[in-house]
């Protein structure tokens, strides 16, 4: 993952690319469950998890996951948490993952990031807490 010419986070082995969206209704009480679900989700090869294999996670804040396209031609972002709410929650999820022993790389909150991904599968999953 890069911001401009700077690499802000990278994993070079199988792991998870986590696009982390924070909903307007989310609060700190959800952080432990988010971290646990991401770390323990048995979605790697042979139904393993990052917790059991030590696989890394690349966490990218992604408010656009809550874009509502039901009306008109432009998405509405009202379901996404405001930056001043979302940023500390993203940081808290990353910190909680690290406290669990996870290897975590990150992007830079609010920055225009370039994310390169090689999908093994492809396999994409929406995990809600």
Image: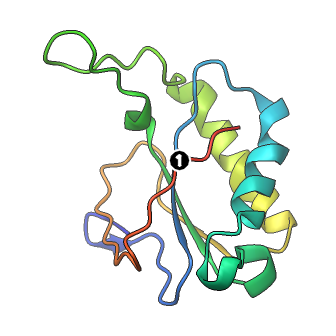
Residue at point 30%, 50% (across, down): 112
> Callout 1 environment at 10 Å: few (<14), some (14 to 19), or many (20+)?
few
Height in image: 44 above or below 82?
below
Q: How many numbered marks appear?
A: 1
- Where does the C terminus fall, quadrant-wise? top right
Mark 1 lies on a secondary structure that is loop
Question: In the rendered view, does 87 fall on the left or right side of 113?
Answer: right
Within the image, what quadrant is residue 51 found in? bottom right
Q: Most extreme residue toward the left, as rendered?
A: 73
Residue at point 83%, 74% (across, down): 101
Question: In the rendered view, does 103 fall on the left or right side of 116?
Answer: right
Question: In the rendered view, does 50 fall on the left or right side of 20?
Answer: right
Q: Nearer the viewer, residue 49 or 97?
A: 49
Q: Most extreme residue toward the top, as rendered?
A: 71
- Place of residue 108 in the rendered image (x, y in percent of width and height, measured from the top left): 47, 54
- Where does the N terminus fall, quadrant-wise? bottom left
- Place of residue 12 in the rendered image (x, y in percent of width and height, measured from the top left): 47, 89
Say how the picture is coloured.
rainbow
- Quickly name the residue at label 1: 126
Residue at point 26%, 72% (across, down): 5
Height in image: 7 above or below 127?
below
Q: Most extreme residue toward the bottom, as rendered?
A: 13
Height in image: 116 above or below 53?
above
- Place of residue 81 in the rendered image (x, y in percent of width and height, measured from the top left): 54, 24
Question: In the rendered view, does 3 fall on the left or right side of 20?
Answer: left
- Place of residue 52 in the rendered image (x, y in percent of width and height, measured from the top left): 80, 81
Residue at point 28%, 62% (across, down): 114
């Amino acid at each position: 993952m890069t911001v401009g010419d700077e690499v802000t986070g990278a994993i070079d082995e199988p792991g998870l690319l986590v696009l982390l969206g924070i909903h307007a209704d989310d609060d700190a009480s959800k952080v432990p469950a988010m971290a646990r679900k991401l770390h323990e989700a048995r979605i790697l090869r042979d139904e393993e998890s990052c917790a059991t294999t030590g696989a890394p996670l690349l966490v990218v804040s992604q408010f656009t996951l809550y874009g509502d396209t039901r009306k008109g031609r432009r998405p509405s972002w009202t379901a996404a948490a405001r930056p001043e709410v979302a940023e500390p929650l993203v940081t808290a999820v990353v910190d909680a993952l690290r406290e669990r022993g996870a290897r975590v790389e990150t992007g830079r909150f609010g920055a225009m990031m370039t994310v390169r991904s090689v999908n093994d599968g492809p396999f994409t999953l929406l995990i809600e807490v």
